[in-house]
Amino acid sequence: MEHVPQGEPGISGFLCWLTERIAYHGGRPVVPGTPIAECGLDSVAMLSLFGDVEEKCGSLIGPEDMWACPTVRDLAHRLVVCGTPAVRGRRIRVAFVFGGQGGQHPGMAGGLYRDSATYRACLGRFDEMLRPCLGRSVVESALGRGPDTEDTALSQSALFAVGCALAQTLLDAGVRPVAVLGHGMGELAAAAVAGAVPFADAARLVVLRGASVQRLPEGGGMLAVCVGPYEAAEAAACEPGVSIGAVNAARATVLSGTLDGLGRVRDRLARDGVLSRFLPVRYAFHSPLMEPVVPELRAAAEQFGGAVPRLPYYSAVYGRQSAEPLGAAYWAQHITSPVRFADAVREMLHRHAPTHVVEIGPRPVLTPFVRRIGGPEGPRCLPVCQGPQSDAVDLAGVLSELDAGPLAESTVRW
């Protein structure tokens, strides 16, 4: 992470960088004197710009403060005024946030698999757990360029294996999370890391969950909308097959339900100028349409029971920390309940005050939401894997930021 440079040459260079990033996210040419309101930035683009600024300079101001600046030059000036070197010597407190369905893509963590022997070995171990239940190698599914990432049963197993392998890679390097949280299907990986469910049992449940969902009739989906949960619920009120599937942050809600119903809600919101997009899933996860899966899922989960998490575990079903055993009743409720991600993140940041939140998954999906919730005084947010091209050098950068790995400056871990 860089800091906003001081002095005229540094300010000039920073202004050029900021102008270029605003033009990129707004999709139009801008100059330092362009009003922020005329830069073509909607709420999604501003959130992406906020992520760029945090990545370069740290948490200085929030997205709402960026909107308040009259021009590009004024925004650059405010960032320079607010920019101060990060406090060194503080103890690093890391929280893991596990991504869920929707983060899949061809070649997941392919660069790490190629370059990192540690990650390759970790993925191999989880592949061995999944192979007897799945009937094939999950490595092929994760790295393949074929249609496997569109297959729910295979993609969920691959996502679970990649997430667990990435987390284990960090753990092997000495990173010790102070709390864990999972989004949707990512809760199974989070529960395994927290010691509430053995990895092998979680792997079997993932395969069964994916296979059971795969047998449901298609025609469901999920729609991300740039409004809060109350506005989203109002827009979907006349669609009995549509409900809230996830609340990720302020003005970041996901609706889940039938494709026809979601399409009508999307048209209704578009007439009011509200942006929305369909997520790359083929079923209405976290909605009552998952009810047919519940009996089989509950019966499978009853075979391993479930224990109390050994690490602070933040449940996206409850939207708070949970110290209860994560047994069959929890996983049955989990698949039909909305994901209360925003509530869980807020409580985790308040109660455990992590200095860093690491997104565990094949590409960053949740990081912008955590940044938005944390605000300018929040933790440093970074993904462990940026996508298929992330390699061992990128991983070393993450470990260095977390003061872990062979070049760690401190052996103190919280």
Image: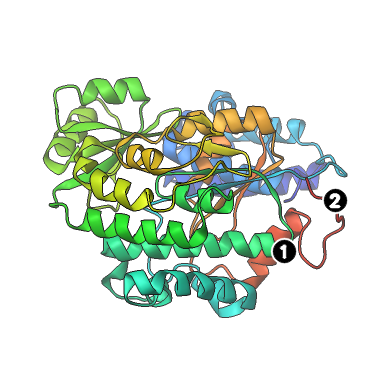
Please tell me whether residue 226 is drawn above or below residue 48 in the rendered image: above
Q: Which mark is residue 173?
A: 1
Q: Residue at x 33, y 70 (%)?
A: 134
Position of residue 339 in the picture relative to residue 147 (left or right): right
Please tell me whether residue 150 is drawn above or below residue 43 in the rendered image: below
Q: Which mark is residue 375?
A: none
Q: Residue at x 44, y 56 (%)?
A: 202
Q: Is residue 187 visible?
A: yes
Which residue was labeled with disc 2?
A: 412
Q: Residue at x 48, y 31 (%)?
A: 342
Q: Residue at x 26, y 60 (%)?
A: 211
Q: Amino acid at mark 1?
A: Ala
For mark 2, give the secondary structure: loop
Q: Amino acid at mark 2?
A: Val
Instruction: Name the one closer to the observer, 170 or 192.
Output: 192
Position of residue 300 in the picture relative to residue 234 (left or right): right
Relative image position of residue 397 (x, y in whole percent): 70, 62
Position of residue 353 in the picture relative to residue 298 (left or right): right
Q: Is residue 31 visible?
A: no
Dot placed on the residue nearer the N-terminal end, 1 or 2: 1
Instruction: Name the one closer to the observer, 311 or 349.
Output: 311
Say which quarter of the image contains residue 374.
top right
For mark 1, give the secondary structure: loop
Relative image position of residue 172 (x, y in whole percent): 69, 65
**Image quadrant occupied by the C terminus:** top right
Relative image position of residue 89 (x, y in whole percent): 88, 44
Position of residue 218 in the picture relative to residue 40 (left or right): left
Relative image position of residue 205 (x, y in whole percent): 37, 56
